[in-house]
Image (tube, rainbow, N blue to C red):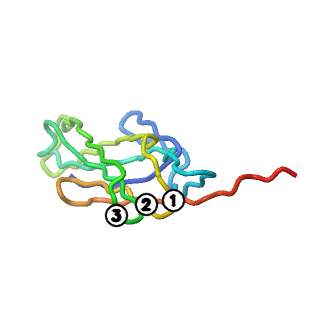
Amino acid sequence: MKVDTALLCDAVSIREGLLHILGGGITRIWAEQFPTAINATLALRVLIQAGEASGPQAINLLVQGPDGEELGSFNLDFGVSAPEGATAGTEVPVPLSIPMHQVQLPAPGQYSIEVKVGDTIARSVRLEAAHRPAQQAG
């Protein structure tokens, strides 16, 4: 299995095996106060060799803070099967949409979402949380 797409987005839906992405490529979250939620969704597309595409598959997401501390971990278990007539070398694309709204960022700084296949980091999505001063009346 390999992860060929990992993108933080405003919204993601999946239809007919395709990722439909709105506002893809988020790299900074502005917040007036902390902690603040990651108000975004992670779009993933994994490719699985047809010969390996039967039965359960697993990916782990690890959200890390500025000092490498773990802020959250998610296990994604999903099933996939190869299309009829697929040869052993055929890659089967699997689109995934993972809401990240439940993850709280405690302070401004650099964060990462590590996408792990087994013990290997397949993709890393970097994210900066920045303080936005409150708007002044006037």
Question: Which residue type carries mark 1?
Answer: Thr
The local secondary structure at tag 3 comes to loop
Task: Please identify, in this view, whether the residue under mark 2 or under mark 1 is nearer the observer.
Answer: 2
- Contact, CB < 8 Å: mark 2 with mark 1? no
Q: Nearer the viewer, residue 1 or 38?
A: 38
Label 1 CA crowd tier, 10 Å (few <14, some 14–19, many 20+): some
Q: Which residue is mark 3?
A: 68
* Residue 131, above or below 43: below
Q: Nearer the viewer, residue 126 or 103?
A: 103
Q: Residue at x 75, y 52 (%)?
A: 135
Q: Residue at x 52, y 48 (%)?
A: 36
Q: Which residue is mark 1?
A: 27
Residue 23: x percent and y percent? 55, 48
Give the Cα distance between marks 2 and 3: 8 Å
Residue 57: x percent and y percent? 19, 42
Which circle's residue, 2 or 3, is located before the other in the chain?
3
Question: Which residue type carries mark 2?
Answer: Tyr
Label 2 CA crowd tier, 10 Å (few <14, some 14–19, many 20+): many
- Contact, CB < 8 Å: mark 2 with mark 3? no
Give the Cα distance between marks 1 and 3: 18 Å
Task: Please identify, in this view, whether the residue under mark 1 or under mark 3 is nearer the observer.
Answer: 3
Label 3 CA crowd tier, 10 Å (few <14, some 14–19, many 20+): few
Q: Residue at x 34, y 48 (%)?
A: 72
Residue 25: x percent and y percent? 50, 56
- Contact, CB < 8 Å: mark 1 with mark 3? no
Give the Cα distance between marks 2 and 1: 10 Å
* Residue 67, above or below 50: below
Residue 71: x percent and y percent? 36, 52
Q: Which residue is mark 2?
A: 111
